[in-house]
Amino acid sequence: MKIEDFKAGKYQQEYKYRSFIPTTINQEWIWTDPKINSLLSEANLNLGNLNAFSLYVPDVDIFIRMHLVKEATKSSRIEGTQTEMEEALLKNDEILPEKKDDWKEVQNYIEAMNHSIARLKTIPVSTRLLKESHKILLQGVRGEQKTPGEFRTSQNWIGGSTINDATFIPPSHTEVNNLMSDLENFLHNENINVPSLIKAAIGHYQFETIHPFLDGNGRIGRLLITLQMVGSGVLAKPTLYLSDYFEKHRTLYYDNLNRVRIKNDLIQWIKFFLVAVTETSKKGIETFQGILKLKEEIENEKIVTLGKKISKAKQLVNMLYSNPIVNSNDVAAYLRVAPATANSLIQDFIKLGILSEITGGKRYRLFNFENYMKLFTKSNF
């Protein structure tokens, strides 16, 4: 199929509305637009650099946890939750009651991502894996009544309060299994010569158009991008998450997906996707560079001044890399020391400019590894 000649699908008359049945995608794809080649080359180059960094950084899995938290926060914000990354790192009893519903959705997404990435060691990217992730995503939150872990058996729609004023009506539930099988076969088809990033772009569009679940399609669809890249070996580590870019360019993200369905313009969506990969890879490299610089500064210039406390100080720094917002009880438990010892070390870290107190109270205080957090929360897009 020549991408420029792509026909996105057809409308099918249902009861009082028309659903959209997307064209199947498990086939060869070619294109003549030279811009695709240049964008693909740039995306592959920057993704390769990110891959190299992920293999170079010591104990990289500690820092990947922060990327997961960021992705969960940003992907959920695209869907309307208001949880910030700093809040996502807190425990349940540290969250205000009015924010707990959103917080729980983000925690579920983190769990779903961790589960699915770990499962890639035993099963491939598949409808089975997506269903498992979806079940975790919707457990105990808004949407838990919408058949978690199962494809829908009724019609859904996007936009509008009712199906009559919807902006988009996905295919009938009777089409979902066949369309998802076609998508899965496409992702694993080794007899076609389609670059992995092009597969990821087309696969994400197709998943969002099928909208196979009653709820959570956006988040699972964005998770599918990372799973496909890790599963195919394009990513050595799960370090590329596009939701930050998509959230910053939310209108363009949705407009380009809709443009495929309305104008058959798959080229423009692929271009947008490849730019997202390039920019996100660059930002990921900058983040890793910042981590290494901060790590060297703290370990070689700051905690070396703590004398006999250096051993525990090093342990605390390692804790902060994966849990950058802590209280004194967290520190005492992790270091296996008395509360007074933990508080003393925290005060040392405050004086050294490593930690800052963020609650302003005298009790139940929280401390933030601020310079580290900034590496993940600053916007470069």
Image (spheres, grey):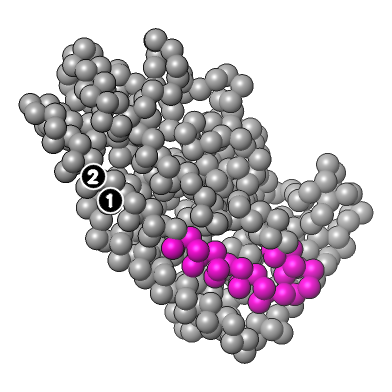
Pinpoint residue 51: horizontal percent, then vertical percent: 34, 65
Of the pair 142 and 312, the residue shown nearer to us: 312
- Amino acid beneath label 2: Glu
Q: Mark 2: which secondary structure?
A: helix
Q: Is residue 248 left or right of residue 279?
A: right
- Estimate the x, y position of residue 269 in percent, counting from the top left: 65, 70
Magenta residues (range): 256-282
Image coordinates for residue 47, horizontal then vertical, percent: 41, 68
Q: Residue furthest bottom?
A: 32
Residue type for callout 1: Lys
Vertical relation: 13 (above or below) 164: below
- Give the quarter of the figure containing the N terminus: bottom right
Q: Are marks 1 and 2 in contact (CB under 8 Å)?
A: yes
Of helix, strand and loop, which mostly describes the magenta segment?
helix
| Residue ID at (55%, 20%) | 96
**Residue 297: mark:** 2
Q: Residue at x 36, y 41 (%)?
A: 372
| Tag 1 residue | 293
Q: Farthest top residue?
A: 362
Q: Image check: 280 left or right of 362?
A: right
